[in-house]
């Protein structure tokens, strides 16, 4: 279950970042509230995963999911750059996350 909790935490992290972007500096109420709620969910599920997964591994995977997911959704939703170098660096994050999972 710990790995499932960690995955949920990572996806919640992506949701929190997207909500933060949509909140426009906390000027919009609904995205601001969503950021707080989803961010709390992210930390809650991360804390559950830490009962079984080493802290360094869990944190690296949590931030990796959050980073990679945020970059991908930024490209899709906010028309951020899709340059080759960004894609290469993104793939390195994903390879690192998968590597940590496989070695844990």
Image (cartoon, rainbow, N blue to C red):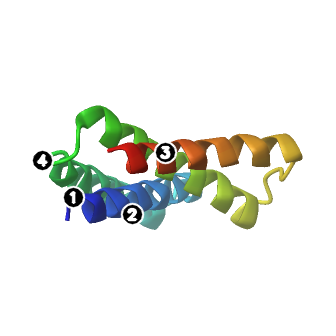
Say which of 8 and 96 sits in front: 96
Say which of 64 and 14 sits in front: 64
Q: Residues within 10 Å of mark 1 (few under 14, many from 20)?
A: some
Q: Which residue is mark 2?
A: 34
Q: How far apart in space, not on screen, are marks 2 and 1 (Cα)?
A: 24 Å
Q: How far apart in space, not on screen, are marks 4 and 3 (Cα)?
A: 21 Å
Rendered view: 59 above or below 9: above
Q: Which residue is mark 3?
A: 99
Say which of 9 and 94 sits in front: 94
Q: Which mark is residue 51?
A: 4
Q: How far apart in space, not on screen, are marks 2 and 3 (Cα)?
A: 32 Å
In terms of secondary structure, where does tag 2 sit?
Answer: helix
Q: Is residue 24 visible?
A: no
Q: Earlier in the sequence, mark 1 or mark 4?
A: 1
Marks 2 and 4 in Cβ contact (< 8 Å) = no
Marks 3 and 1 in Cβ contact (< 8 Å) = no
| Mark closer to the observer (2, 4) | 4
Q: Earlier in the sequence, mark 3 or mark 1?
A: 1
Q: Position of residue 36 (x, y in %)?
A: 33, 54
| Quadrant showing the N terminus | bottom left
Q: Residues within 10 Å of mark 4 (few under 14, many from 20)?
A: few
Say which of 44 and 53 sits in front: 53
Rendered view: 100 above or below 72: above
Q: Which residue is mark 1?
A: 2
Q: Is residue 94 visible?
A: yes
Q: Is residue 73 left or right of residue 12?
A: right
Q: Residues within 10 Å of mark 2 (few under 14, many from 20)?
A: some
Q: Position of residue 77 (x, y in %)?
A: 70, 66
Marks 1 and 4 in Cβ contact (< 8 Å) = yes
Residue in the picture at 59% in, 43% down: 93
Q: Is residue 24 left or right of residue 3?
A: right
Q: Earlier in the sequence, mark 2 or mark 3?
A: 2
């Amino acid at each position: 279950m710990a790995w499932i909790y960690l995955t949920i935490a990572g996806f919640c992290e992506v949701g929190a970042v997207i909500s933060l972007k949509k909140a426009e500096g906390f000027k919009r109420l609904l995205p601001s509230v969503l950021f707080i709620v989803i961010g709390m969910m992210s930390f809650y599920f991360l804390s559950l995963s830490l009962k079984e997964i080493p802290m360094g591994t869990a944190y690296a995977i949590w931030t990796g999911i959050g980073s990679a997911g945020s970059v991908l959704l930024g490209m899709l939703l906010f028309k951020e750059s899709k340059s080759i170098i960004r894609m290469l660096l993104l793939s390195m994050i994903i390879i690192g996350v998968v590597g940590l999972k496989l070695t844990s």
